[in-house]
Image (cartoon, helix red, strand yellow):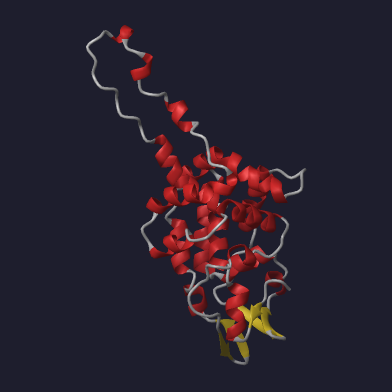
Amino acid sequence: MSDQFVQPPQFETRRESATPVWLLIGAAVAVVVIVGAIVYRALRKPAPPPAPVATAPAETSAATAAPPAAAVAEEPLPALDASDPFVRERLAPLSAGALWARLLQGEGLVRRFAATILSIDERKGVRDSFADVAPEGAFSVQERGGRQFIDPASYARFDPWVGVVSALDPEATAATWRRLKPLAEGAWREIAPPERTLDQGVNDAVDHLLAAPLGPAEIEVAPQGLVWVYADRTLESLSPAQKLLVRTGRDNQTALRAWLEAFRARL
């Protein structure tokens, strides 16, 4: 399986490196979608009123009038290859936390978004999309009565990332997603099948994550070679993205599902 738990600690970090970022991608439906929250606020900031003039309103020069809101909203997006600075500058004020700053250090954010959505869409693994961001600590299990269960400490590693997702504004995120779609579609067209649209990929990714069953309070695992697998065959048969979502723990999964529901309602 492509999404198994590695038993030896030295392998665990390598096989789990991208998990927290995919949570951000899955919950916000992509880094570009998350970017929307701050860009939305920037683009919708009201323009200052024009300075008072002595002439009558009918004689006011068009050159001195405040630009219409539509003109501000149509500010051109940067080229895809040069979009990282644009993304970082607008994302930085969204959160002052160290995790947010850590996420912004990545390169090729828009292309990573497209690759992650396509991986979820095609039911493939998502670990390699963001290998430079990983949760603190290692995956561990507890043994009780000759059976192994995921250690609650393993779930707690994801708490900070879930907190980042939960703080995002779903309405602002969805509104800005429509504004930034041309930029994202450029990256999508580079890698996706020509008959598959970005809208289809995003909608499928959200629906697919929401379709993952809510994991039990205690998740039993079983050794299989050098890896751990879910003892419950229903969980083990899930897609890689769904299994990672379950792996965050019942409470974190519940919080992420609530955010995804709120986001989907605004698409």
- Give the residue drawn at x 43%, y 46%: 38
The foreground one among 124 and 130 is: 130
Q: Is residue 138 left or right of residue 55?
A: right
x, y percentage for residue 5? 64, 78
x, y percentage for residue 140? 55, 83
Residue 267 visible in the current orientation: no
- Figure check: 115 above or below 16: above
* Residue farthest along the bottom direction in this orientation: 146
The foreground one among 220 and 228 is: 228
- Figure check: 7 above or below 21: below
Q: How many marks?
A: 0
The foreground one among 171 and 88 is: 88
Q: Is residue 144 left or right of residue 225?
A: left
Residue 198 visible in the current orientation: yes
Q: Is residue 189 left or right of residue 175?
A: right
* Residue farthest along the front direction in this orientation: 82
Q: Is residue 153 left or right of residue 114?
A: left
Looking at the rendering, in which quadrant would you find the N terminus?
Answer: bottom right
Quarter of the view holding residue 177: top right
- Figure check: 96 above or below 193: below
- Give the residue drawn at x 70%, y 45%: 189
Quarter of the view holding residue 214: bottom right
x, y percentage for residue 115? 65, 56
- Give the residue drawn at x 64%, y 64%: 126
Looking at the rendering, in which quadrant would you find the C terminus?
Answer: top right
The foreground one among 161 and 78 is: 78
x, y percentage for residue 204? 67, 50
- Give the residue drawn at x 68%, y 54%: 118
